[in-house]
Structure formats: C-alpha cells, structure tokens
Image (cartoon, grey):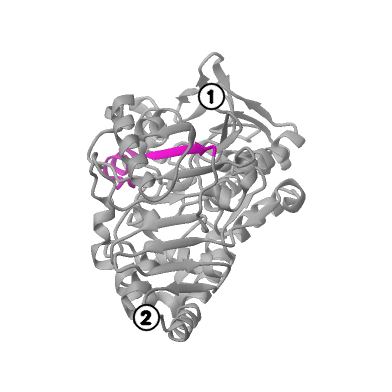
Amino acid sequence: MSKINTVAIIGGGVSGLSAGGLLSQKGMRVKLFEANDKLGGCCANTDIDGYTFHDGALYLAFPGILEHVFERLGLDRSSLLPLRKIIAAQTTTLPDGTVLSFGNGLDVTIRRKGGANEGQLKKELDSMLKKWEPVRRLFADDILRHPFSWSQLIAKGWRHLPKFRGSVASEINNLFSDGAVRSAMSGVMLFSGMPPQKTPVLSILGLVAMLTEGFYLPEGGMGKIPEALSRALINNGGEIFLNSKADKIIIRNGRVHGLKVDGQGLVEVDAVISTASGMTTFSSLLNDEDIPNSMRRKVQSAPLSHKALVIQLGLSNLVDVRSHSNSILPMMDDQYKVFMPDEDDVKWPVYTMPTVTMPELAPHGGSIIEVFPPIQQNMPADDWDTQKKERMAISAVKALSRIHDLDIAVKRVIGPKDFQDRMHLYKGAVYGLSPTADLRAYFPHCSPISGLFQAGQTTYPGYGVSSAAMSGILAAETVMRTEKM
C-alpha cells in the first residue's frame, strides 16, 4: 500500500485519543473527529449545578494497563492524572441479614447474627489469590498489552488453561464454603449483565483485580482520563475536531480515500482508524457495496452485551453509606432475579455513590447516587423515550427512598437510546460485544479494506477504560507496521 502520511480517527474516546497520540508522536498527521461537543465518549463528565456526573464509566480497573498506555505516549500519568484509590469498595446486603463489606485490599468483613468465621474466609481468600493472581498478572502485564491470539496465550499461559473452564458460579462454589460469602463474591461481577451461572469464569479476574490492584477514581472524575490522554495528540500537532460526526468512510479502488464529515464534506486521508464499534463501522459507516462479506457476516452474528439504564441523583444531603458500590442482592443461586425488570418496583437495588470516595464531585454537604435498575433487554433502544425512562426512574427512586433519606436537587436519567444516539454505542449495548463472545466475534485491528483500521472494545477481549485505551495503542501499532510493508 501507499505511504501513510495522514490518518483520520473516528471518535474521541480513550481508544481514539490513544491511537492518535501514538501516531502523531511517530510523525504522522492526525485528524480526530468527535461527534459530540467534548472528548471522552462514555468516559466523560457532565457538570450540572455543581454536581459532576459520569457519562458511563464508573471507575478505573487494571490501572497498570493504563499506566503502560501513558508510558507509550510519553506522558507523566502521575502529574497529568492523579488517581484516588477506592478504599471502601463494596457492601452487599443479603436476605438473611448478612452484610459483607469489601474494604482496602483483603480487608473483607462480615456482619451477621451469631458472628462469622472470618478466619476461614481469610484462608479461602488466600487460596483464591494463590490460584488466580498469577492469571491476573499474566493478562495485565503481558497478554492484554498485545493483539490477542490463542497461540500467544497457550505459549505463555498453558499452565493456567485448565482454570478457564466453567462459570463464575461454579468457581465461587469451589472456592468458598459460606453461602453468604459466595453470594457477595458473585455479586461483585454482576456488572457483566449476566447471572453468575452464565458468566465466564475469567470474569473472576475483575474480583481479583479489586482485591489486589484495587479500583480508582481520577481526581475530578472519569472525564479527566481523556483530557489527560489528549495531551499527547495536541503536543505533537494533531488536530481535534469536535461536533464533527463522521458520516461515511469513502473507498475508491478498494482502499480508503477519505472521510465524509458532517459540516466539512470530504476530508482526504491515507488511512482511517474507526473507534466506533466494528458493527457500526461495517454497516452504517461504509457504503453497502464496500462492505467485505466476511465483515458483513461478523456484524450479523455479533452477540451484543446488555443495555443499561442509569438514574443519577444529585442530593443536597449526605447519605449514611460507607461504600462506593452498594447492593441488596438475593443469594447466588437466585441472582438471575437481579436482571428481571419490574416497572413498579426495583426489588434488588444496585447503586454506586462516588462521593464516598470523592466528596468534591458534589457541592459541600451534598452527595451523588447512581442506580442501575434492570430493564427489558429485548426492547429496542429506540423505544426508550422520555416517558419510559421517567417511569423507571420513579420506581428506582422509590426503592432507594426505602433505604436512605433523599433530598434530590438534580436528577439525570441515561437510557439505552441515549447510549445509542449520544454515546454512539451500537444498539445501546454498553460493552459492544457480550462478555460471553467467542474470540472469533471480535473485529481485527487491520480490516480487509486497505487503509481501514479498527480500535475500541470490539477489537479486544475485556471491557473497561484501560483495555479501551490499550486497544488504541494496538491499532496505531498496526497502522505503523502496515505503513512499513
């Protein structure tokens, strides 16, 4: 292919900013086009009347991977992005009255009538980490820093492959003897959108990461991450265009010719990195005749993740909550009920309170609660109108009001249609591909079309801010390797 001098990047989230920062560092001309009026995508902040709300991403996991991204971009993460550890991670309340709290690291406490055998719990936690911490290190320090391949995983992690069989439920049953402990442990992983019986066992690495590395919030909220990453692109002369929606990738003679951008017309470039989902890239961003059959089939068969509804409340009062994340859950065997929607009553409230970790996200004396009620997954994102969202919000607030005193100053509701239209998530699926997706469902960084590359979470196993940023680095490296061929 011809020499690549100018690269257009579709999307100003963390993957697009990482890709653009690395390419501009290597001397390429980079033009990044973001449809919204701010950078970050789902990893952004929205300020309303003194309350700083997150637009999607709730916390930073696997900070070592993000540290590696900053190093690759020549950025000093500690000065550009100070992080605050979430030292009161999660509290789970169970039907029998047991309350299990995760503090800092292995500080796990159980409160219930008759007491608890915390010595046994300590032994079982140590046993879990002995088994799974080497796997977490393998993925965080090696596997997830390269384009994923089974051959690489087998070569470097063959000793661990027998551990990858089964579900979170089966593994939790093997690791812990106490039913309440099992339920609280599996509850940590309900963010996947699936009950523990259907969640792949590798999702347990999220629990292991919480107990070892910990979870973090950037000072000022999650939106500070894209703000910091943008420095590499800006410092190296890259251009960022906000309110600039990419309408079509133009293909001529089988290769990328340019990008049609709303308000700018045709922007001629040598290559395009799309950080939209692979499903979006190989459907609406290309003319039908330009879509390779292999990619068309991949789009049609893509197993999507769950959709989500988020109700964010800015409160004038402080709430007596000790943990960043909080949940009232059934026992593990019944946790499928958490995902059963009921417009009239949220029976199993799951909510976060970021002001436990970072009080300054709210005005003095105030707090923020974010609640995630279950919704109908078979309902198209387009059907989530204002009235539908408001009915669910009323139900969620009623459920929270049974637990806490709420003096609501600001309310914000983000539904599947908002995630689809404003955050540009394909059909409102919050993770793009399902956590159960086979590796063959992922989209390659280097597409079958010359000059078209893909970044973002549909190119890369795992989900979260760190992995999304790393996918941008991998896509940029793919561009550079291709340019040298």
Identify the residue position indicated by label 2 in the image.
Answer: 114
Q: Residue at x 41, y 36 (%)?
A: 425
* Near-viewer residue (70 or 444): 70
Q: Earlier in the sequence, mark 1 or mark 2?
A: 2
Using the image, tell me which numbered label, if any, was put on residue 147: none
Say which of marks 1 and 2 sits in front: 2
Circle 1: element type: strand
240 relative position to 309: left or right: right
Q: CA distance from mark 1 to mark 2?
A: 69 Å
Vertical placement of residue 15 versus 180, above or below: above
Q: Quadrant of residue 264?
A: top right
Q: Position of residue 257 (x, y in %)?
A: 52, 25
Residue 308 visible in the picture: no
Residue linked to disc 1: 258
User: Which quadrant is home to the N terminus?
Assistant: top right
Would residue 371 be seen by someone viewing this image from the given angle?
yes
SS type, badge 2:
loop
Which of 208/471 is in front?
A: 208
**Residue, x 37% and y 55% (percent of image)?**
192
Q: Position of residue 282 (x, y in %)?
A: 38, 34
Relative vertical location of residue 109 with respect to residue 275 in this rendering, above or below: below
Q: Is the residue 295 above or below the residue 213 in the image?
A: above
User: What residue type is disc 1 on?
Assistant: Gly
Q: Position of residue 464 (x, y in %)?
A: 50, 51
What segment is highlighted magenta in the picture? 295-316
- Residue that appears at 64% across and 49% down: 218
